[in-house]
Amino acid sequence: MMFSFGQVVGLKNLASRDLNVNLYPGSDAPLAPWSPILRFGIAASVRLAIGIVQVLISVGLCERFVGNKIQQFADLCSLSNVSVFILMHRCYGFYIHGRSVHGHADVDMDTMHSYLQKEEENLCPLRGLEANSDIQTFEVLLTDRTRALYDKINLPLAEAPRGTQIRSDIHDQRLRSYHALNRFLTSFLEHRYKDMDYVVKNKFLLERILDVEFQEPGEVSVLYNDENALFGRVLFYNHELTLLIFETLVFCSVDLGAQDFVLGALVTLVVQKLAQILRGVLGKRNLAEKTLVEKQFLI
């Protein structure tokens, strides 16, 4: 598409130092030299405009009328009876409350259909973490004490030596850490630790606008209601603006060096695919290490 705007529409001709604006100069017309600043500005503007249109179509049409994959993931967690605790930083992260309101999810399709029908008819509790609430996603601010206990549970696994000869020992430690971590998180969310409790609250308006937290966790952790599913920040899926700016800079850099929109578009496409592959490989490795689940079991 960038190639079409640059070559076919003729926007590249606006980058010449000639004061006369002509998108389709004749073959015998004198051509002034390119202006690097104008060429960069035109290429970047068109690439950003196309990207913004794509984002608007995705957010305004696809996610609204076809399906929001982020929200569908939260629904899948509830149907699977699996909760997800994500830490982006030492004491900051997200929580997806996926505990099934029916107690278990290992049932046949008929039973699952009856469960969903009960939810549709409001014959069972809401899916939310709190009573009479359907909010399943939260921003999390942990206290240092809670994080310290979390690190203590994972310490045996972190200190385990690496190597093929001690594979069975690592596997046993991984299982013990996995079960201990599950018990700890379950007890924490059920308010069993009086010295490591938490509260659920809403962010102030200014906090939501500036995307910062003005309040320190203090003696208790804080779970902020997150109706916008901000946990998508940990995914490659939710970094459209960052990727758009990165791809724009790659395209413009190649074009300025080679003065060729086609080459710039091809290099940008290759870099985009390589970034996706790298993200997939490193993301799967990181997920296996942090969830204590072998890579072979990750889809």
Image (cartoon, rainbow, N blue to C red):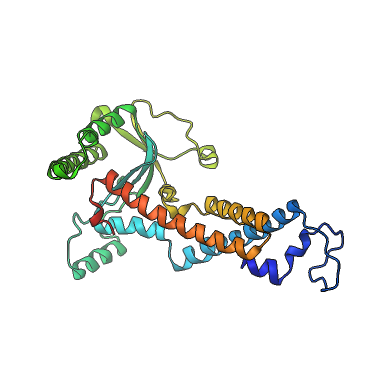
As displayed, is residue 107 above or below residue 183? below
Along the horizontal axis of the image, is 234 left or right of 48? left
Q: Split into 4 quadrants, where in the image is the N terminus?
A: bottom right
Residue 194 at what x, y percent from top left? 24, 29
Along the horizontal axis of the image, is 93 left or right of 80? right
Residue 263 at what x, y percent from top left? 61, 63
Q: Residue furthest bottom?
A: 27
Nearest the eye: 38 or 71 = 38
User: Number of marks in the image?
Assistant: 0
As displayed, is residue 165 above or below residue 246? above
Nearest the eye: 292 or 52 = 292
Residue 74 at what x, y percent from top left? 34, 55
Residue at the image point whose x is 23% and y is 63% from the top: 115
As displayed, is residue 94 above or below residue 10? above
Give residue 248's quadrant in the image. Answer: bottom right
Residue at the image point whose x is 46% and y is 39% from the top: 203
Residue at the image point whose x is 45% and y is 68% from the top: 66
Along the horizontal axis of the image, is 86 left or right of 82? right
Nearest the eye: 76 or 12 = 12
Give residue 29's quadrant in the image. Answer: bottom right
Say if residue 95 shows up in the picture.
Answer: yes
Q: Split into 4 quadrants, where in the image is the C terminus?
A: bottom left
Residue at the image point whose x is 80% and y is 58% from the top: 33
Say if residue 44 shows up in the picture.
Answer: no
Residue 179 at what x, y percent from top left? 17, 42
Give residue 172's quadrant in the image. Answer: top left
